[in-house]
Amino acid sequence: METPVESTRERLLNIAEQRFGEGGYEGTSLRAITVAAAANIAAVNYHFGSKEALLRAAVSRAMAPVNTERRRRLDQLEAIGQPTAEQLIRAFIEPGLDLVLRRGDRGPVVARFIGRIAFDPSQRIRELYAAESDPVEARYLAALQQALPGAAPESVAFGYVNMLGLLALHQSLALSPVPGADESEDPGKLAESLIAFLVAAFDRGLRN
């Protein structure tokens, strides 16, 4: 059974994900979060210390399972041999989309939150997000450069940044389906379509 302290902390984190995902960091007041969470500023200060620390805790909670799964998949691929670019793209994209596809009602909220924060207008907020994901992301970039030895490192890096942006776009649109899309379609097709697009984009970009 959860204690009252644990319950208040979880409510604050859940509401923070929702409100930051909708309005961004600067567009979301701490008061709006505390009112929606039936808490107060003192509770935020007690559990987290500040609005920014609350954001950091929410990002850490959301990204921890993604980072763990990405690291596990990369370790597995590298233990077998030199992974291909397609294998690396799949191992990176699928855990990120897992935020949407396999987390029930909260999946879209968490995915939209991460997609919004990853490319927040504020450099400080982007750096905060990067601190939670950079170690494993740097490994993937290095692995992609090894998998594409004929490509200039800057070309691979350019493709990698665009892969991050496209993934974040799909995450940030998690609560806003594309008009005309078939909502009954297997959501797993999104991962396959995105992976196929990225593999083709890397191949085409490196041939030009």
Image (tube, rainbow, N blue to C red):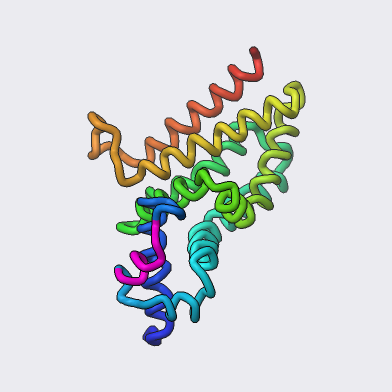
Q: How many marks?
A: 0
Q: Is residue 104 magenta?
A: no
As drawn, the residue found furthest toward the top would be 208
Compared to residue 199, the image places residue 164 above or below, namely: below
The one nearer the camera, 207 or 18, is: 18
Would you say 161 lies left or right of 144 here? left
The quarter of the picture where the C terminus appears is top right
Q: Position of residue 38 (x, y in %)?
A: 30, 75
Q: Which residues are magenta?
A: 28-35
- Dividing the picture into quarters, in which one does residue 144 lie? top right
Q: Residue at x 38, y 51 (%)?
A: 23
Q: Residue at x 40, y 44 (%)?
A: 172
Q: Residue at x 39, y 49 (%)?
A: 100
The one nearer the camera, 38 or 177, is: 38
- Dividing the picture into quarters, in which one does residue 182 lie? top left
Compared to residue 18, the image places residue 44 above or below, namely: below
- Dividing the picture into quarters, in which one does residue 32 lie? bottom left
Q: Position of residue 143 (x, y in %)?
A: 71, 39
Q: Position of residue 128 (x, y in %)?
A: 59, 55
Would you say 99 lies left or right of 154 here? left
Would you say 134 lies left or right of 56 here? right
Compared to residue 45, the image places residue 31 above or below, namely: above
Q: Residue at x 57, y 36 (%)?
A: 89
Q: Position of residue 70 (x, y in %)?
A: 59, 50
Magenta stretch, main secondary structure, is: helix
The quarter of the picture where the N terminus appears is bottom left
Q: Is residue 33 magenta?
A: yes
